[in-house]
DNA sequence: GTATTTATTGAACAACTGTTCCATTTTGCC
DNA sequence: GGCAAAATGGAACAGTTGTTCAATAAATAC
């Protein structure tokens, strides 16, 4: 007996990616076997290799997709405005975008060491691009005299670390709504940048 | 032929812990085999089990030791003073203490999911204790009218995430000294707390 | 210098690893 | 309804996993 329940090429691919994303986030890349992923989707392990050349590509694909989408989504949302308005937009965007992509965010940070050197470099370049967007906002604010920032690069790292940290504790069922959290973090971001 | 190079019980134990700490930080708990650790120390794998009952205990021991030392070190350093002075002391202590313990900090954050539920709960309790120290400082500052903080708990999480983030980018060989970084982060911490 | 304790080796265990491949089944096209 | 293409199952490969254990070597105590 071979396959037991029909052929579903168009939906199997996404289902594999979904399962891999969730399992990698929950248990870590090294702890998740190809058989676990296959079992989650209801396949035998061999069938996975119709959709990915190997396990590494599965991880890298998920991370690259996430980072490319992140950069693209921000560049779409970012329009002109004062440095202050752009900074507020960045803070709120970062919190919102990351909140609904917990697993991908977690993987993109935790599994960097499981990438091959070439793949690592590509992901790091995307991360630098995203960080660069915030650095540019801060630098522009300094130039216009709106912000008081000793070092835009360091302040950008600090703000991103602070904002990303929301994912480690925020739960929809908690005492604060995401809008509340956004407001509080925007306030701290504004003050950290010395904005009015 | 059995053992080849002498018996060294008092130094073998620490050497195993050192190797495990470094390897877990570099490659991740799941990706490091007991044989890799043994090989790093110059032992056969069986000898490790004179020093640890199993791999999980090796990880948990490292994490608990780190967290207990962290809490104890802070409580020793923390003396009285104004909320502002205590906040500054906390920010500078956190950066300094974590900077020289990169591997342990990394493990204590990244390998939480590889702990058994009971062990996880113990580590989380220690983390809550440490966070509680900062929350108490912020709450006291609010009570005395020195800080402007909407929610001490959230501000504490934000500050800790920001400060811990230094470890992801700071290198001794970079353009800034650790003292420079301390100053900049204390400034951002102060402003995030609405302190003068 | 002998006896006892401690530390270590080396082999073994069953289970699991990523990946390949061929036979088989299902799908989409005519 | 028949045929090619695509998707899947199932088995196999060689290597690795955490852990146990008897045999052996070295360190310590007397």
Image: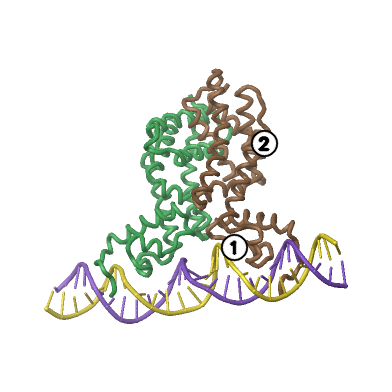
Chain colours: A green, B brown, C purple, D yellow
* Residue at x 26%, y 64% (from the top left corner): A8
Image location of residue B17, percent across then percent down: 65, 55
Q: How many marks?
A: 2
> Which chain does the numbered disc 2 sit on?
B
Look at the picture and state if A30 lies above or below A181: below
Depth-wise, is mark 1 or mark 2 nearer the camera? 1
**Label pair 1/2, CB-CB below 8 angstroms:** no
**For mark 1, does the 10 Å Cα neighbourhood hold few (<14), some (14 to 19), or many (20 or more) residues?**
some
Q: Of the residues under marks 1 and 2, which one precedes in the sequence? A: 1
The front one of A137 and D8 is: D8
* Residue at x 56%, y 28% (from the top left corner): B136
In the picture, the quarter occupied by the N terminus of chain A is: bottom left
> Which chain does the numbered disc 1 sit on?
B
Image location of residue A79, percent across then percent down: 38, 36
* Residue at x 47%, y 41% (from the top left corner): A168
The front one of B95 and D26 is: D26
Look at the picture and state if A32 lies above or below B122: below
- In the picture of the structure, the residue carrying the numbered disc 1 is B34
- In the picture of the structure, the residue carrying the numbered disc 2 is B179
Tell me the element at label 2: helix
Image location of residue A35, percent across then percent down: 40, 65
Look at the picture and state if C1 lies above or below B153: below
> In the rendered image, which quarter is residue D2 located in?
bottom left
Image location of residue A38, percent across then percent down: 37, 63
Tell me the element at label 1: helix
Q: Is residue B134 left or right of residue A26?
A: right
Residue B107, label in figure? none
Q: Is residue B120 left or right of residue A78?
A: right
* C-alpha separation, residue under disc 1 versus residue under disc 2: 39 Å
Look at the picture and state if A5 lies above or below A134: below
The front one of A161 and A21 is: A21
**For mark 2, does the 10 Å Cα neighbourhood hold few (<14), some (14 to 19), or many (20 or more) residues?**
few
């Amino acid at each position: 007996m071979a396959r037991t329940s029909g052929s579903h090429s168009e939906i199997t691919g996404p289902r594999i990616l979904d399962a891999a994303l969730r399992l990698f986030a929950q248990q870590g890349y090294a702890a998740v076997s190809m058989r676990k992923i296959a079992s989650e989707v209801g396949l035998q392990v061999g069938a996975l290799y119709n959709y990915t050349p190997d396990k590494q590509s599965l991880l890298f694909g998920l991370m690259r997709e996430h980072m490319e989408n992140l950069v693209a989504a921000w560049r779409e949302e970012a329009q002109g405005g004062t440095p202050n308005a752009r900074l507020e937009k960045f803070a709120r965007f970062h919190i919102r975008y990351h909140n609904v992509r917990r697993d991908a965010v977690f993987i993109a940070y935790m599994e960097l060491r499981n990438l091959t050197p070439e793949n690592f470099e590509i992901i790091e370049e995307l991360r630098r691009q995203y960080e660069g967007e915030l650095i540019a906002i801060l630098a522009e604010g300094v130039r216009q005299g709106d912000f008081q920032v000793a070092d835009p690069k360091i302040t950008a790292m600090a703000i991103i670390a602070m904002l990303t940290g929301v994912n480690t504790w925020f739960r929809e069922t908690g005492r604060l709504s995401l809008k509340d959290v956004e407001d509080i973090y925007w306030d701290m971001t504004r003050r950290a940048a010395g904005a009015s």
